[in-house]
Image (cartoon, grey):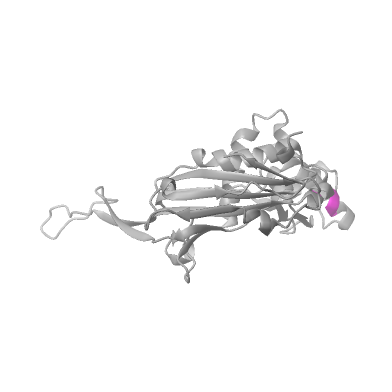
Amino acid sequence: MTVYLDPTKKHDAILLFDCLDGNPNGDPDAGNQPRVDPQTNQGLVTDACLKRKVRNYVEMVGKDETTPERYKIFVEEGSVLNEKISRAYTAVGLPQEKGDPSQQAQVAKWMQQNFYDLRMFGAVLSTGLKAGQVWGPMQISFSRSIDPVFPQSVSITRCAATEEVAKKDGSTKDNKTMGRKEILPYGLYKSHVFYNPHLAEKSGCVSERDLELFWQALIKAWEFDRSSARGFMACRGLYVFSHASKYGNAPVHELFDKLKIKSTVAVPRSFADYQVDLDEDLPDGVTLTQLA
């Protein structure tokens, strides 16, 4: 088995991605402006944003798997979560009342086996019908840009009117609509990923293919998530540190410090404006796989 696909081992990873002339993750509480750390002006992208890209990718490719029923998505856009919990109660043959802890565990187990994002990321399953809470083995941190970013609000004009408005003299009023787009010129972001084999062991249903799809999603999901608002985004690096022991062979911060990134110009505007250095002198029992 390829080491970085082994669900019984501990894995820690660094993801690099960038955004050119777009908004990688707007903040609805700030007029949808790109998220920033107000003290350092470094850009931020939430874990939920990256998990959504993974979910969308797995939902797209999962239907072509040999066991597509294992790759359904629990947290879908526009779906009703309680309906899926109700379906799980029916599938395991339990009455749809508030089950006791053992019954809830049965329902949660069935849902982990059938919903990819649930067995990987976990979820709260007590939003109506109770099925407990699942702690997923795969977690993603907030992403932070290497350098400060400088969001801009760009004016745009729509030449077509939504409805005809007449002037007092009877002529048609020019009813052009003004709007805005919130973008940043460029940002290179770094995120940390953690896989805990002990939580995977509890469910007993995380497979080698599950891990393979996850790493693929971090690399390829950007290709199927294009929009004018997000500009041009791409994966610029994925470094997976795999431990021989499920308890880990080295502290994760020491491994992440092996990757050094610095800009080579005053105002970076592309990935080529950065120097990425990787110290491959690793502790015993740690294997590094560079997937992108």
Q: Is residue 152 above or below residue 287?
A: below
Q: Is residue 36 left or right of residue 124?
A: left
**Residue farthest toward the left in the current orientation of the protein:** 169
Residue 179 image point, x, y percent: 31, 56
Residue toward you, 116 or 35: 35
Q: Residue 105: x percent and y percent?
A: 84, 52
Which image quadrant: the C terminus? top right
Specify whether residue 213 is in view.
Answer: yes
Residue sitting at 55 percent across and 41 percent down? Answer: 221
Would you place residue 213 above or below residue 17 in this image?
A: above
Query: Up-down: is 38 above or below 86?
Result: below
Q: Which residues are magenta?
A: 104-108
* Residue 69: quarter of image: top right
**In the rendered image, the vertical position of residue 192 relative to residue 205, given as above or below:** below
- Where's the N terminus, which quadrant? top right
Give yes or no for residue 105 being in the magenta stretch: yes
98 in the magenta segment: no
* Percent of width and height locating residue 282: 69, 48
* Prevailing secondary structure of the magenta residues: helix
Inspect this view and state whether residue 100 appears: no
Which of the 4 quarters of the picture holds residue 88? top right
Q: Residue furthest front?
A: 281
- What is the total number of numbered labels drawn onto the structure image? 0
Q: At 87% across and 52% down in the image, what residue appears? A: 103
Q: Residue at x 62, y 53 (%)?
A: 258
